Image (spheres, rainbow, N blue to C red):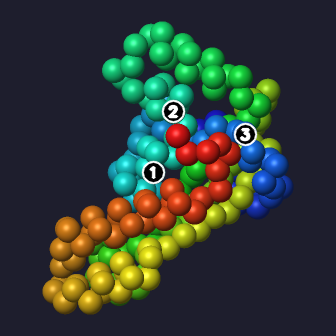
Amino acid sequence: MAGDVPVPASQPHCTPADLAGAPDLTYRTLRQLGNLPIAATAELADWINPVQLDVPAVRVLADPAADATAKRRAAAEMLNARAWLVHDVQFVGAPLALGVKELKIGTVGTLIIRYDRETGKPTCTQLFSFQNTRATNDWAIKISDTPVIDPRVQKVLRDDLAAQYLKLTPRGQPAG
């Protein structure tokens, strides 16, 4: 699945019914599960791919400390799903969160991809984007009066983006 990421709009748009009941995982976690390299890019950074987006079974599979029995149960749960939803961060336009002094609101664009269990192929996609909250962004702009963005400001903005992602993204299963 990690090697078969469709371009936006190349698949039909996912409806709420397409998403319902399918377990969620981030593209970063999908790469981790496949023992694929995780590039040092903003789109694959851990802060913008919150583990809370992964369903509990995926978290167990990705946990190197999980015991074999727990991993088998988690694998069985994932293999019983009719489809999987992969949340792929496509664009991180959040200069302040990335330490770049460009005073604009942070925006992140993602692609939600539904993969069919039978074929492992994408069946539909949904574009989804979100931004820093206005209050957090305004605060960061107000206090960023030096040439370099303070790492503490970056962290607040990153945490805010991750919270917005978890709060607003369409999901297949309730947060676990």
The disc labelled 3 sits on which kind of residue?
A: Gly
The one of 136 and 1 positioned closer to us in this rendering: 136
Residue 37: give its label.
none
The disc labelled 1 sits on which kind of residue?
A: Asn
Judged left or right of residue 166, residue 135 is left
The disc labelled 2 sits on which kind of residue?
A: Pro
Q: Earlier in the sequence, mark 2 or mark 3?
A: 3
Name the image quarter holding residue 48.
Answer: bottom left
- The residue positioned 67% from the left and 63% from the top of the image is 127
79 is higher (above) or lower (below) than 68: below
Q: Earlier in the sequence, mark 1 or mark 2?
A: 1
Q: Are marks 1 and 2 in contact (CB under 8 Å)?
A: no
Give the secondary structure at mark 1. Answer: loop
The residue that mark 3 highlights is 21
Q: Earlier in the sequence, mark 3 or mark 1?
A: 3
Q: Are marks 2 and 3 in contact (CB under 8 Å)?
A: no
Judged left or right of residue 18, residue 171 is left
**Where does the image place residue 31, in percent across and percent down from the top left?**
50, 37
Separation of residues labelled 2 and 3 (CA atoms)? 14 Å
The residue that mark 2 highlights is 56
